[in-house]
Image: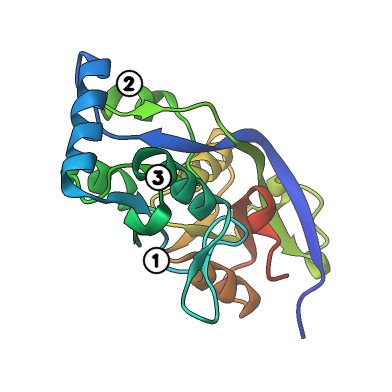
Amino acid sequence: MKKRLKQAGLGIAVSSIVAMSAVTSPAYAEHGDTLKAVKDRGNLLCSGHNGSFPPFVQVTDDNKWSGYDIDYCRALTVAIFGSDDALKVVPISWAQRFPSLQSGDVDIIIKATGWTMGRDTELGIQFSVPYFVGATNVMMPKELGSTAPETLDGGSLCANAGTSTERLAANFFKSRDINIEMITFEKSEETREAYFAGRCDSIVGWGPNCWLGA
């Protein structure tokens, strides 16, 4: 039986954004080099996900990529090549996003990603205008009687490893001197499954995906 749920917001906005290919100064010259490399290679390497993150990216029952992020990947491929046949989706985890971009394993990241000051100034990447903005939420069983994240002192929290959501939650609780154990997982479905299996008292998530599967 699934848990009865309560959600409480951390009050921190997180953007779902398009992170353009890695650049060094001057940015525009590097963009040109990236586009030329894509055209010369004959395909676009676009980020997927190493699991399921609906409605943004998932694999259908007939083994095809789908979701909002994939639609943008297809649209960009069509803009470059005139057809989405040249699209190659590369499944990567949350933690692999920026190393994959910097190493050239992907040309572009179209994936739920927090636009933070550190990422914007330290990683040498360019962000587009966000196409989806969501809040960071903490979800917990109704049986706990909690009405806010501040009431979780001494408890545990499931989170996706290597995400700004994980870091925002950690900073939120630390700033309020709340003792909470962070339990992280590489895949989003692993995080949700752990929560519903009772491995942690609460779960932190971004936008609509926090409650999907509830």
Q: In the rendered image, which residue does mark 3 sit on?
A: 82
Helix, strand or loop at label 1? It is: loop
Nearer to us in this view, 173 or 129: 129
Residue at the extreme bottom: 1
Q: What is the CA distance from the residue labelled 2 to the residue labelled 1? A: 27 Å
Q: In the rendered image, which residue does mark 1 sit on?
A: 50
Quick check: can you spot residue 87?
no
Percent x, y of residue 83: 41, 51
Asked if residue 25 is positioned above or below residue 171 in the image, the reply reads above
Label 3 vs 1, first from the N-terminus: 1
Label 2 vs 3, first from the N-terminus: 3
The residue carrying pointer 2 sits among few (fewer than 14), some (14 to 19) or many (20 or more) residues within 10 Å by Cα, namely few
Asked if the residues shown at circle 2 and circle 1 are in contact, with their CB atoms under 8 angstroms apart, the answer is no
Instruction: Look at discs 2 and 1 and give the one toward the viewer.
Output: 1
Q: In the rendered image, which residue does mark 2 sit on?
A: 121
Instruction: Look at discs 2 and 3 and give the one toward the viewer.
Output: 3
The residue carrying pointer 1 sits among few (fewer than 14), some (14 to 19) or many (20 or more) residues within 10 Å by Cα, namely some
Q: Quadrant of the N terminus?
A: bottom right
Percent x, y of residue 27: 26, 18
Residue 84 lies left or right of residue 106; in this view the side is: right
